[in-house]
Image (tube, grey):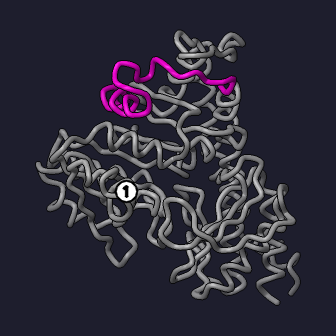
Amino acid sequence: MNKDTIVQNAEEKVKQYFDRIDNIKEYNQEKVLKAFYKNKIGLEHFSTVSGYGHDDLGREALDRVFADVFKAEKAIVRNHFVSGTHTLACCLFGNLRYGEKLLSVAGAPYDTMEEVIGKRGDKRASLIGHGIIYDELPLINESDVDLEGLEKKADKTTNMVLIQRSRGYSLRKSLNIETIKKIINIVKSKNPECICFVDNCYGEFVEKLEPLEVGADLIAGSLIKNPGGGIVEAGGYIAGKAKYVDQAAYRLTAPGIGTKGGAMLNQTRLIFQGLFMAPSIVSEAIKGAVLASQVFEDIGFISTPKPDEPRTDLIQTITFNAPQPLIDFCKTLQMYSPVESYLTPIPDEVPGYDDKLIMAGGSFIEGSTIELSADGPLRPPYAAYMQGGLNYAHVKIALKGIVEKLIR
């Protein structure tokens, strides 16, 4: 069977799930549109100021729009955040004090968080180096959150729980909103003052509800992932209860400045437009991921989530159990990128990671993972983590090339 037939047959199988994805898209698009209406966004909000960035009407409106979309008391949205990890670090360092305890409830967090926490690297700069106590709740069968174990772990000594929505570089299940709600309910029943902090990267607009709507106190994410709609050049956001957002903002800028400063350098319009486009772009990426899941299953690979599973993030994994197929996969995907298709990705060291990584994705924005990309650490089980796609057609075309390579 040739590549075109394989992908076409897979597409016929998964079309039945696309109505569900479109329904979520339309719901979230209306949510975003209402936030624009409420805040009376006009052309005056696209102009920015220089220097200290004081009295920037556009920046202030942008914060309000994000707060309304994510149902937050307050939000800070800035191009000054260099990555999703940076937003998370600001939340952690801003809201935890010496002697307080952080609990990761879904096993080990994403690799880049290990140096932030102090599991490796220069501990003096880490949370542990600042006197924060850190603990992890192991997963059940390396897949599911141990809700019974959480009942025992989340006690009065726990000041914050870290809930990572996406799977990171693991094969555990990503956490859907229903599971996040269960985690929060357990934590709050044990300690109502405990901060429930959700790493929302890759999850925005994939479901109808966001974590703050089921009881989370604080969320954070990157603008070169879902909420940037594929056009935002840099930045991140933090949203939630005002007192926690303010403390995080003091870590981004300085005490006394918080959300009141920071020149946006003519990025405000792009961020507004990216947010407006985000629900539709996310739905295209999700459709591509569902198709990819069916394609890889049909040609005999272990791939998760399964085609019929409701989604809570963008990521599709393909397990190869050997380094060379992972490398070949990424090389092939690079060939089907709109930018730098002529380059050959190779495994190399990347800041923030302990293992060598191979990364593919000729994207218009460097490192953008709402654009079609794939990466993976060179360690067992040698899984590729495929995500993004600004349009479904691009994902489909790339899958044909990948299938041709894998079935040779």
Vertical arrangement, residue 193 with respect to residue 8, above or below:
above
Judge whether residue 106 is colored magenta: no
Position in image of residue 14 (x %, y %)? 70, 66
Residue 279 rendering spot, x and y as whole percentages: 65, 41
Measuring 86% from the left and 87% from the top, which residue is drawn there?
1
Residue nearest the observer in this picture, 168 or 143: 168
In the depicted structure, whether residue 279 falls above or below residue 255? below
Q: Residue at x 26, y 54 (%)?
A: 128
The x, y position of residue 185, in whole percent, is 25, 48
Q: Which residues are magenta?
A: 240-268
The residue shown at (67%, 63%) is: 289
- In the image shown, does 39 or 157 lie closer to the viewer? 157
Other residues around mark 1 within 10 Å, as few (<14) / some (14–19) / many (≥20): some
Figure check: 249 above or below 21: above
Q: Amino acid at mark 1?
A: Thr
Q: As rendered, which of 250 and 319 lies closer to the eye?
A: 250
- Is residue 278 visible to us here? yes
Nearer-the-camera pick, 51 or 170: 51
Q: Count the numbered circles shown.
A: 1
Whether residue 215 appears in this view of the structure is no
| SS at badge 1 | helix
Residue 401 placement (x, y as % from top left): 84, 74
Which quadrant holds the C terminus?
bottom right
Location of residue 335 with respect to 321 vertically, above or below: above
* Residue where numbered disc 1 is placed: 179
State the image quarter where residue 253 is shown.
top left
Residue located 78% across and 66% down the image = 334
Any magenta on residue 257? yes
| Residue 206 in the figure: left or right of residue 191 | right
Q: Residue furthest left?
A: 156
